[in-house]
Amino acid sequence: MNPPIKVTKTNDSSLSTIDFNNIPFGKVFSDHMFLVRFDGEKWHNAEIRPLEKLQVHPGNLAWHYGQAIFEGMKATKLHDGTPALFRPEMHAKRLNASASRMCMPEIPESLFLEAIEKMVRLEADWIPPAEGSALYIRPLMIATDEFIGVRPSKDYTLIIFTMPVGPYYPKPISLLAEEHFIRAAYGGVGEAKAAGNYAASLYPAKMAKEKGYDQVLWLDAREAKYVQEVGTMNIFFVIRDKLITPITDGTILKGITRDSIISIAKSKGLFVEERLVSIDEVVNAHEDGSLTEVFGAGTAAVISTVERIGFRGKDYLLNQDNYKVAPMLKETINGIRSGRIEDTFGWVKPLLPEAIQA
Ligand SMILES: *Cc1c(COP(=O)(O)O)cnc(C)c1O
């Protein structure tokens, strides 16, 4: 049995101070947060209450040994104003996969989904209506034992809080294919959305920025040969009109945008290959002119096109005017999310008013 979710509403909403046409990403938070605790055996004390700072003991296990995982998903408004979630059960499953790898407790999918739905219903007025904008939902699970010593925590807290994000028009990005630093090794935690993965990526990303690139294009840890992914996005290539993306081999985060893009591309009759992609293949395809598009895919930006890849001191430029596949895919995903394009995949979950639904 899932614990009932107690709801305490704010009487001090900050919604009226927000300009939906000008929202800085990741800095503006909605009024409430969801919390539920795990005591070593069961999830208990589920509640939604006004967003506030949490008190944390200095010995909090997550701070020292890194048991911390998260998710990132979006709620949008359909054209009739109904709030809708995008593939929420996929996020529940991935959170639990991350939890299991990090020795953290799984949360019943039904409890996670109920919490997300209750939060989004309560914060529905925080969902910016313009297509391409959304309410970004951040679930976070952390260890909370007050204990110094390396072992799995007994207690955990799962928090869900949300942020409105404006329509995102990412500039084309430049990537540095990195041969020295790695993101994830076989047998490691690359497939988990674990906080430590991002901490480990900061230094190489800083080095790449100093060399004039926006982000790192990660290569495999064994041979520095096969392309893995980018920062918080999976990577796609269009070579000879085929859509090619690295296979998920345990080192790559299994992006839900990645999965959606593959399905949409197939439904449009594109040839899609999930396989090993070597950086040499990318460079050769660029040199013989068959590489026409490179783009990253993830929930935050949906799709970011790549304008330049650096590898071994050479830059490989991509002409943005030639991009056809990436804009079509982005258009389709955003259209499905807003209800403008029919959702033939069953991805969009409208949150109808509870009274009508019952
Ligand atoms: C979250 C994330 C992605 C993208 O996953 P989506 O489910 O599409 O948002 C890709 N790579 C990394 C490392 C990530 O953390």
Image (cartoon, rainbow, N blue to C red):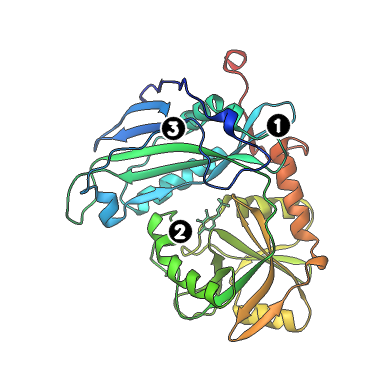
For residue 159, side relative to residue 351 (left or right): left
Asked if residue 314 is positioned above or below residue 248 in the image, the reply reads below
At which x and y percent is residue 257?
61, 51
Residue type beneath disc 1: Leu
At a point 24% along the width and 50% down the height, the residue shown is 61
Would you identify the image quadrant in which residue 74 lies?
Answer: top right
Q: Residue at x 54, y 39 (%)?
A: 163
- The residue at which mark 2 appears reads as 191
Alpha carbon separation for disc pair 3 and 2: 27 Å
Question: In terms of image quadrants, where is residue 233?
Answer: bottom right
Which residue is denoted by mark 3 in the rendering? Answer: 33
Category of crowding for the residue at label 3, using alpha-carbon neighbours closer than 10 angstroms: few (below 14), some (14–19), many (at least 20): many
Pointer 2 residue Cβ closer than 8 Å to ligand 1: no
Element type where label 2 sits in the image: loop
In terms of image quadrants, where is residue 6? top left
| Contact (Cβ within 8 Å) of mark 2 with mark 1 | no
- According to the picture, the residue beneath numbered tag 1 turns out to be 78
**Label whose residue precedes the other's in the sequence (3 or 1):** 3
Q: Which residue is at the front of the view, 129 or 241?
A: 129
Q: Position of residue 142 (x, y in %)?
A: 33, 45
Q: Can the viewer see residue 184?
A: no
Residue 262 vertical placement versus 37 (above, below): below
Sequence order check, earlier mark of 3 and 2? 3
* Camera-nearest residue between 54 and 178: 54
Mark 1 element type: loop
Which of the pair 163/145 is nearer the observer? 163
Which quadrant does the N terminus fall into?
A: top left
The residue sitting at 31% across, 34% down in the picture is 37
Residue 134: where, in percent of width, then height? 63, 39
Q: Position of residue 209 (x, y in %)?
A: 54, 72
**Mark 3: which amino acid?**
Met
Amino acid type for the residue under numbered disc 2:
Glu
